[in-house]
Image (cartoon, grey):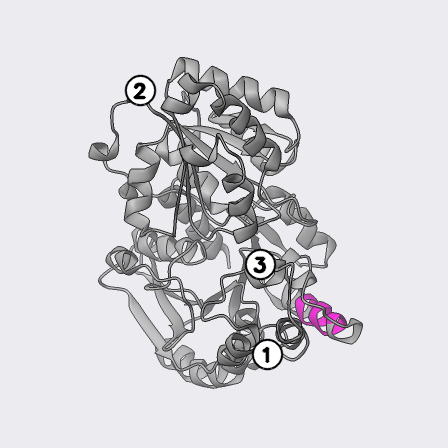
Amino acid sequence: MKGEKKKVLIITYYWPPSGGAGVQRWLKFSKYLPEFDWEPVIFTPENPDFDLKDESLLRDINPSLEVLKFPIWEPYKIFKVLSGKRKLNQGQILEDQKSSVLKKLAIWLRGNLFVPDPKRFWIKPSVDYLMSILETNEIKHIITTGPPHSVHLIGRGLKLRNPALSWIADFRDPWTEWTILKRMLITKPIWNIHKRQEHEVLKMADVTLATSPTAVEEFKSLGARKVISITNGYDVGDYSVSDRTAHTETFKMSYVGMLSKERSPEVLWRLLDELCAEASFQERFRLNITGIISPIAKDQIENLPHLSPCTQFQDSVDHEEVFNLYANSDLLLLLQSREEGSFSQLPGKLFEYLGANRRILALGYEGSDIDKILTETKAGQLFEYDDSVGIKTFILSIIESRNETNSQNVGRFERKALTQDLAKLLDTL
């Protein structure tokens, strides 16, 4: 019967009040799926261990959405004791240049004892619990999203017990090609386990869902049966007309997200420092960096005498506040990781920048998916990290024109349009 909603179980570790980029993708899909005759059911941990929280995201949950929560045990207290940190911000423990023996031990334990990740203890209990849920509610479609990739092993367990299930394995980041995983001192036998588990997931899933066109080819080369790309996007409901402020004499460049040592653009910082050496430029230029900031990257800026006084650092802010920050910016900075394996990654922040209708300066790989999207939409420009001449010319042209972007075809990245693509995919399974 037309209009009758079919149920789909979405298994995700990240769910509000978890903050950060990982939660956005399926929070938004679940928000709009009912409009396309699909009723999502969320399965998520009851007591997850994450430090980044954003209570404002709770307001974005569809009131009619069914959310199932199940207890999880995670060994993060061990890591925190060994690393000497109360908070374990993603990736930062791996870039500490003065790692103690205990920190190195914590990294080794994380990489070699907890395969594929510390959430592995959630796999079997979840499979046992969910089998009865699927049967009782006649749910025939499941979606798993990782990282953490142990979530995909829940999908594998369910598929083994009921081969008739339709399973979509969504990869927000790679598995064995993930740069963070490669830095965890993993031994060869453990690498082989990762590769075997990844291969099993890619072979057993009816569809592997990737977040970029290039990632599609990468997953195909790893043996995936069928790979489809649905990118991340932006939600028009997150942007308020009142957020858009009039331009002032001050020119603000903003970066939002994780600023790691590997992403930190020293050439750009030095270039801005040279420009700020001119009093008139320094007086009207401001650099805002918001998010998880590497101490190493922060020191790089604070050691520059002219740029440092123009720079403001702040911790991660609520999702709602982020859009006010975009609206009050003249230029948005996007940094593609320079680590191996990052060529195919499309950061979710790119799409929020597109929705904000502000010029984008991206640093990364020419010819990457980021470069192609910026070229197609005319929303900004990408330069190689060391292209100081091109970067300087672009920045000065934006300062001179002070105009908003005249971007094109950005609407295809709206969350609702992307959810319609997902619903069409589900309809075929």
**Apparent side of residue 220 relative to residue 42 in the rendered image (left or right):** right
Of circles 1 and 2, the one toward us is: 2
For the residues labelled 3 and 2, the Cα–Cα distance comes to: 51 Å
Above or below, 238 relative to 65: above
Q: Residues within 10 Å of mark 2 (few under 14, many from 20)?
A: few
For the residues labelled 3 and 1, the Cα–Cα distance comes to: 16 Å
Image spot of residue 104 (x, y percent): 66, 71
**Apparent side of residue 176 relative to residue 17 in the rendered image (left or right):** right
Q: Which mark is residue 249?
A: 2
Above or below, 119 relative to 26: below
Res 250 visible = yes
Question: Which circle's residue, 1 or 2, is located before the other in the chain?
Answer: 1
The residue closer to the viewer here, 422 or 371, is 371
Residue placed under numbered mark 1 in the picture? 160
Q: Residues within 10 Å of mark 1 (few under 14, many from 20)?
A: few
The residue closer to the viewer here, 416 or 335, is 335
Residue farthest toward the top in the current orientation of the protein: 400
Image spot of residue 242 (x, y percent): 20, 33
Above or below, 269 relative to 69: above
**Apparent side of residue 181 relative to residue 394 in the rendered image (left or right):** right
Q: Which residues are magenta?
A: 191-199
